[in-house]
Amino acid sequence: MDTPITIEEIIFLANVPENLHAAFLRVANGLHERAKYPKEKVLLMLVKMLNDPKKYAYSKNKVTNLAKTVFDLRKAGTEISLTEDGKELLVNEEAVLTLEEKEPQQKNTFNLREGKLHYAVFGKEHIEEGALLQMETAVSLPISVAGALMPDAHQGYGLPIGGVLATEADKVIPYAVGVDIACRMCMSVFDIPTDYLKREPHFLKKILTENTKFGMGGETARKYDDSVMDQPEWEATKTIRSLKDKAYRQLGTSGTGNHFVEWGIVEVFENDPLLNLPKGEYLSLLSHSGSRGFGGTVANYYSKLAMQKTVLPKQAAHLAWLDLNTEEGQEYWIAMNLAGDYASANHHEIHNKMAKSLGEKPLKIIENHHNFAWKEQLADGREVIVHRKGATPAGTDELGIIPGSMSQPGYVIRGKANAASINSASHGAGRVMSRTKAFTTTTRSQMNKILQDNGIQLIGGDLDESPMVYKNIEDVIAAQSELVHVLAKFSPKIVRMADANRKEGRED
């Protein structure tokens, strides 16, 4: 009999909420250890059940009781969605579920340090307790060197969203980068009067829908520039090679969750030499998305591998790391950086197609990652790897974009290189409620009224991205005046997001 099924193997395939972890493990390991089912068969059974819980809830089988719980949750509005890998398994039952094709992994067990590192918190009054506790765990890792928490922070897996963690220079934590590797912002600023939005809204909506695709099945046949697919790194590892075809099909598309492409107005406040745009108002295009299925699969694969190799106390399990001096560490580093290039190319595909449809070249393009790991130097000269999970690089003279919500403005900023923040700033407004709570406590009419009051047209979208689920962006910006200098304000007007589909997992 091989090893017991772990919760990491289950959440690799489905977004199972923490309060059901014990139930899923009890059923899975009952089948695996007592009924002698192979691990692969058990995991496939769970995936099939989650895909159609009603079928399994009303038939006599090994997972009936668990299926009834899942189905009751679905009826109440809470969906347990499959990850990209879980969906892949549904259509390809031969898909690799485990990492046993590799050499047996040498496990190393680590304890957290007794005295955690001090870390800076910006806008603490806006941050939930769960995010603070997660950050305290992160800075207690034996490899942690420094940490900081941004004012948009909220609880996530492993490192909180809005968390910044510097580790030893040869240690990288896949979950501290995040599942949507290299999620980023991109803005094109056009030399077009802003009244164009009032004169040609139908045309702008038309080219917005024609040139964007959203969701896990989103693919494009027409490419503007697919040269990113010629990079030699696509042949670097078996994992990367297996994902190349999917990555090509999804090039130029956007994810679900809080990903968007939108038209709006940028107001430039001053003649800043770095921004290099005269004061005034401009028609602009803003997009937010990441590395799609490629990045998600890479993140899940190497997070699982890290947790197999680096064993930590339960509360820190998702913060397992890979050593860059090992083959696995180098593989992840190559894949992560390739995901960064790929995510940037996704945005450029969209922006180039939109500019071509508009018949204009942008005056300026501004962009930045916010789910990534960089090799950097701290103020005291120490070499480190800086993980920014939902945080914007804000070093000396770095431009960045901090969006609000579909009804709140976003801001173009220049970094101030604040050492306490590890040269970072927030990546957005930050959530004040979970997606589940948003679906159960907000209404479409409430959301529509806010959009109407603010003169915003929405294409797609759902209640989990409603304006009321986000913090006030003005409070978040005010809490980081030491970190950034605000150069311009972006006001959304025509917003395109993934269509409502609560059976599909959310990628952000």
Image (cartoon, rainbow, N blue to C red):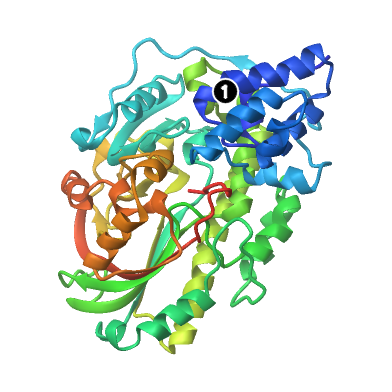
- The residue nearer to you, when weighing 452 against 331, is 452
Q: Quadrant of residue 113?
A: top left
**Label 1: which secondary element:** helix
Residue 295 in sight from this viewpoint: yes
Residue at the image point whose x is 82% and y is 42% from the top:
93
- The residue nearer to you, when weighing 37 against 162, is 37
In the image, is 408 to the left or to the right of 40? left
Query: Mark 1 sits on what residue?
Result: 21
Q: How many marks?
A: 1
In the image, is 82 to the left or to the right of 236? left
Number of residues whose C-alpha sits closer than 10 Å to that of mark 1, classed few (under 14), some (14–19) or many (20 or more): some
Residue at the image point whose x is 46% and y is 64% from the top:
460
* Residue 352 coordinates in the image, percent (x, y): 49, 77
* Residue 328 coordinates in the image, percent (x, y): 67, 35
Residue at the image point whose x is 28% and y is 23% from the top:
118
- The residue nearer to you, when weighing 231 against 405, is 405
